[in-house]
Image (cartoon, rainbow, N blue to C red):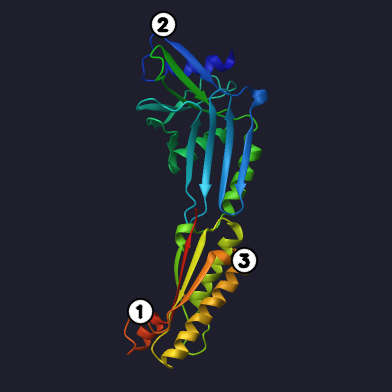
């Protein structure tokens, strides 16, 4: 009954008018059944899940990248049949009598899609949950014009798992697959050693590969400048490409998924008449693909 009171308190404070004869369908876990779970994919993603009985699941997700953005997904068992908005409010707990609900945002409901909110609103919802409030979504049912739907995210059992989620997010890689899927590295003249910057890039790829076994293919194409002779440069480019392949296999990429090509002096991208131009031509291009 207390939860029902809170929801009706929410409705009375909104700008949306409800027909007195309209039905209100409420979806929220009971206090004893409020479950928050952390789903972690190594250092690539963190997902905080909350099951909503008979409705679906609320998900807060963060992925590996420089900014580690946050998103909220409302995974509905029955997706919208049309286009509308769901109001998102923060409802105070019972032990805060007289505290008004707070309006947080509007969530777009798109036909045959789950609901999704961006980073700013996701953080708002998380901070409200941390304070013990109930982020609540409400909208007109698309299958029954006589019904309004209320969906609540209960804060019971939230804080402990939320702390684990924050730790998981803190350990995410500061770059994504898209950041390394196409990488160009360069070699020092004559020695074949990678430049310092290129070693850092290759180490970054290596760290990613340790955390993602689902690389479908890797293509390594190596090139040289025009010094030392064509046959020697051809052999040199093939040797460098194979060395990078060996490195990736040691990190767990299956050998049959790695293809190497040595082009020697072919396909220059800059003039060989200058030191800077030759530096650009001594390169290896690594291209990776996922399913």
Residues 262 and 7: in front is 262
Foreground: disc 1 or disc 2: 1
Viewed as shown, does residue 46 lie left or right of 138? Answer: right
Q: Residue furthest bottom?
A: 228
Q: Residue furthest front?
A: 256
Q: Residue at x 48, y 36 (%)?
A: 73
Q: Are marks 1 and 2 in contact (CB under 8 Å)?
A: no
Q: Residue at x 34, y 78 (%)?
A: 269
Is the N terminus in the top left, top right, bottom left or bottom right quadrant? top right
Separation of marks 3 and 2 at Cα, in angstroms: 64 Å
Image location of residue 265, percent across then percent down: 39, 84
Image location of residue 22, percent across then percent down: 42, 9
Viewed as shown, does residue 100 lie left or right of 145? Answer: right
Which residue matches tag 1?
A: 267
Residues 172 and 131: in front is 172
Secondary element at tag 1? loop
Where 24 falls versus 63 (above or below)? above
């Amino acid at each position: 009954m207390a939860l029902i009171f809170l929801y009706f308190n929410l409705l009375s404070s909104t700008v949306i008018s409800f027909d007195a004869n309209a039905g209100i369908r409420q979806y929220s876990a009971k206090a004893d059944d409020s479950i928050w779970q952390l789903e972690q994919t190594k250092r690539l993603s963190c997902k905080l899940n909350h099951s909503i009985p008979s409705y679906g699941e609320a998900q807060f997700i963060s992925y590996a990248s420089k900014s580690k953005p946050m998103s909220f997904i409302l995974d509905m068992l029955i997706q919208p049949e049309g286009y509308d908005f769901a109001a998102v409010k923060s409802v105070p707990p019972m032990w805060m009598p007289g505290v008004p609900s707070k309006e947080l945002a509007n969530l777009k409901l798109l036909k045959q899609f789950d609901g999704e909110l961006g980073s700013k609103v996701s953080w708002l919802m998380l901070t409200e949950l941390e304070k013990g409030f109930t982020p609540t979504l409400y909208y007109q049912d698309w299958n029954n014009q006589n019904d309004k739907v209320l969906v609540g995210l209960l804060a019971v059992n939230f804080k402990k798992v939320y702390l684990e989620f924050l730790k998981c997010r803190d350990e995410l890689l500061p770059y994504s697959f898209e950041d390394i899927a196409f990488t160009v590295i360069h070699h020092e003249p004559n020695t074949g050693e990678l430049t310092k910057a290129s070693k850092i890039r290759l180490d970054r790829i290596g760290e990613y590969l340790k955390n993602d076994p689902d690389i479908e293919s890797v293509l390594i194409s190596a090139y040289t400048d025009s010094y030392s002779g064509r046959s020697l440069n051809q052999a040199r480019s093939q040797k460098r490409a194979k060395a990078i392949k060996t490195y990736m296999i040691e990190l767990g990429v299956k050998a049959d998924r790695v293809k190497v090509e040595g082009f020697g002096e072919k396909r220059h991208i800059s003039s060989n008449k200058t030191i800077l131009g030759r530096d650009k031509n001594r390169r290896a291009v690594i291209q990776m693909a996922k399913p």
